[in-house]
Amino acid sequence: MKLQVYAYILSAAALLGMVPTVAAQAPYPTRPIRFIVGFPPGGSNNIVARMISPKLSEYLGQQVVVDNRGGANTAIATEIAANATPDGYTILMNAPGHATNPSLIKKLNFDSIRDFAFITQIGQAHNLLVTHPSFPPRSVQELIAYSKQRPGQVNYGSSGIGTSVHLSAELFQYMAGVKWLHVAYKGGGPGLVALLAGEVSLYFGNLPTVINHARSGKLRAVAVTGLKRSPAAPDIPTVAESGVPGFEVATWWGLSAPAKTPPAILARLHKETVRALNDSGVRKQLQGLGGEIVASTPEQYAAYVRNEIAKWAKVIKAAGIKSQ
Amino acid sequence: MKPDLFDNRDFLAGLLFIALGVLAIAVARDYPMGVAMRMGPGYFPTVLGGILCLFGGAVLVRGLRSGQQVSGDWGWRPLGLITLSILLFGALVDRLGIIPALVAMFFTAAAAGREFRFKEVLLLTVVMGAFALGVFVYGLKLPYALFPGVWWTS
Amino acid sequence: MDILSNLALGFGVAFSPENLAYCFIGVLLGTLVGVLPGVGPLVTIAMLLPITFNLPAVAAITMLAGIYYGSQYGGSTTSILVNLPGETASAVTCIDGYQMARQGRAGPALAIAAIASLFAGCVGVLLIALAGPAIAEWALQFGAAEYTALMLMALVASAVISGGDVLKGLAMVVLGLMIGIVGVDVNSGMQRYTFGVPELVDGIGFTVIAVGLFAVAEIVVNLERKDPREVYTGKITNLMPTRGDLKDSAWPIVRGTAVGSFFGVLPGTGPALSSFATYLLEKKLARDPARFGRGAIEGVAAPEAANNAAAQTNFIPMLTLGLPASATMALLLAAMTMQGIEPGPQVMLTRPELFWGLIASMWIGNLMLVILNLPLIGLWVSLLRAPYRWLFPSIIMFCCIGNFSVSNNPGDVYLCAAVGVLGYVLAKLECEPAPLILGYVLGPLLEENLRRALLLSRGDPTVFFTRPISLTFMIATLFVLAVVIAPGLRKKADNA
């Protein structure tokens, strides 16, 4: 008897759940939009998402709800988005992990290109190569010469395997033909602490997290990883101009939707996102994070992602980082 | 094997530790071991698995000597129902929304109790469910669907 | 001494009606999310961060900081009442706090937790004000070798934690160490024990383990009994601690504060480890260690003091060097940067009103928390008068939502159910969960630092003995080992 009642309640609940929501002919959007972020709260991805979501909500006339699905360097969130109904009510925040996971994770249950409709690259930020003041080389050239004489003896720190901090150093070794010893830390905080304490000699930190330490003399700034100098630190040369031409590593944020999302909806999302990015408040906040607005077209953004995937596949293979 | 071994507290605990230790070592065989001074990812878990087996063995032998029994009966029924209620919540919350998930969870969990009064459980579900929605969905603005495709909008 | 004028400036800033209001909102929110398992200060601060862009810097930072230390007050509440750790650092409080509640002493337990937190919080803030920069510089000397030695000492000391059954306690510590391994290996990037499940790549979350082992297992143990006896004793003696309670707790609070202040400064260790460390210390120092685990008030007072002191000193590296000691601190750092403040040593000079205003607000906030929490005790305790058949489904609800809310992932909820089954079996076999949690907290730190130290020394193990701090911990470890083993040996000799 007891169980019967209980089964009834369960099925009633299930039935209630299955009633399809009335999708009338009203123009998109008619209900809140889920904005999936591949990191737990904390970190720049989450901040960027929460920076633009209020603006997007305002322009679209519907709540854009940030949904943090952290794990596996965005792979968990990306899989959820890839499998979501392509109706414009699910959008995804992309991060560099989107481009490196195909090389780092053997079994991905989605295709980083084919399963997505790319909307726009929101912005990007660059890293800054900093060294401990006791470390002799002062420039990229000196660093390369110094490292060539001491293969495997220079220690560099990172915020973890596969992060942009780590991959910057791997790209540098690959392009400059030097060999360092990688010491991985759990996150940017501990990695930076180790550099300040002199446990490691060099570190490609996210610019805003290390620039103040360089200014106060606790660290020495060597070069930035952008192709052009950073507006936040125009006095610091780029790696590319100091002897490793073409060297570029960016941390980036982008917006995509499941592949079969209707073109009209994608166009609307693109228009409103670019509008949100042109908001002076958003621009200022992103600059506070050391980033700059990109706001590219869907075609440019898709090409960018494709290029990133190819680039990192090469570096990761050369560095001998095993996929699993 | 004597049947009362299955009720021997330390024997079972030892067995469990050994089983987990062996499992750990078996899985860690796929990871590079390295050497003590340059440990690979397999080194630490293998050593730990070995230590766990040792401790497990000692607990097991002690159990054979003391023969202390598990106190009280095993509560398989409450364990099963409580576990099921948590699993149901997990399975439903993303598919059907938080309200159906909570209803299923409350009724299953309450069935694990000594007495099940339908009206009381219903009331409890409504009161606590409303509280949870108020705190988590309304207050903390966690992005949970109430029903499929139905979100709280403010 | 210009510290007085600095403090005067700080209090002037903090006492403005606006800043007082934001401080209050912060600690209130902190208490709330502290009480709830899963949702913690990290999530809350992350969600509120965008809103604070529009606030003045002092108000924003004051509020966000309040959420963090406020959560340490709230975390103990559910630990004591229903064996459900609200925050990582309050897992230890479950051991004796919950036993006190079952004996009808939930009131004194909650009150002593608040009093201990107030004392520790105030001392922690004092440390920031007086010696922040010096402490931060000192903490930088902790490298991989030092951490390894420190963790080794904690590991050896952990043998003390188990209630009498050292053998099983040690086995549980090792099991905890192994559970801590699950996920991506920091040193090599290799996935271990993930069995191809993406949810396991980042490891098994603390909430999953703590909720499963403590709360879920405890509920099933209570339900398995056939007799309808209530779980909590009917009589509730008094709400406030007696004079004797206060006397028993005084020194443990002081020691807990010291231990907590130490761990709080070290990046990566923080409140959770400090509360375990101080519990071990108290148990070893106690005249009658057998009382621990059966509702000893020191077992609540010391860890609660420790985690709150640690929550305050956690700010030291962030405020004085611009270095985050934890993920939450990294978020606060981001909040400051986005307000246009450059964190680091210069903050004290360029923005004194912010630095000293924050310090002053922390004292005020700690006081607010006690005023907020003490009257609530009556309400909390009266909840325990509800029949257990109402309580346990509600606890399960908080377990479910709590686990789901950590990363909005049903996988965590399933995992918690599995850990609950393991927890119940272990409880029936009388294996205590606390040593396992300790191992789980220690394990990743120990392995990571051990391997890093050897990597940096190019495989030379003498590194642990040539660095002074590391050497000190190594000697201390041997000493602890002797203290732990000696009584056991003596007993054996007596028996023979």
Image (spheres, rainbow, N blue to C red):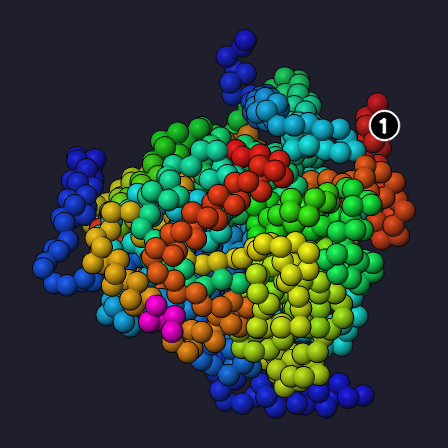
Task: Examine the rendered structure and indicate whether residue C388 appears above or below residue A232.
Answer: above
**In-image side of C397 versus A252 (left or right):** left
Q: What type is the residue that disc 1 sits on?
A: Ala
State which quadrant residue A277 falls in.
bottom left
Which residue does the image show at 49% across and 52% down from the upper left?
A96
Q: Residue at x 64, y 84 (%)?
A: C351
- Is C324 magenta? The answer is no
Q: Which residue is rendered at x = 43% and y = 53% of the image? A: A304
Query: Which segment is the magenta one?
Result: A274-278
Viewer-closest of B96 and A237: A237
Q: Decide if residue C278 is in sight here.
A: no
Task: Tell me which residue sits at (68%, 90%) in the image.
Answer: C8
Residue A296 visible at all = yes
Crowding near pointer 1: few (<14 within 10 Å), some, many (20+)? few
**Residue where numbered disc 1 is placed:** C493
Q: Chain of mark 1?
A: C
Quadrant holding the C terminus of chain B: bottom left
Residue C444's quadrant in the figure?
Answer: top right
Q: Position of residue B146 (x, y in %)?
A: 25, 55
Horizontal side of residue A9 vs C203, given as left or right? left
Residue B154 vertical placement versus A178 (above, below): below
User: Which image quadrant: the N terminus of chain B?
Assistant: top right
> Foreground: B126 or C313?
C313
Q: Percent position (x, y) of residue A57?
A: 29, 68
Query: Is most of the magenta stretch helix, strand or loop?
Result: helix
Q: Nearer the viewer, residue A315 or C63?
A: A315
View extreme (top): residue: B1
In percent of width and height, residue A306 lies at 42, 47
- SS of the residue under disc 1: helix
Q: Is residue A275 magenta?
A: yes
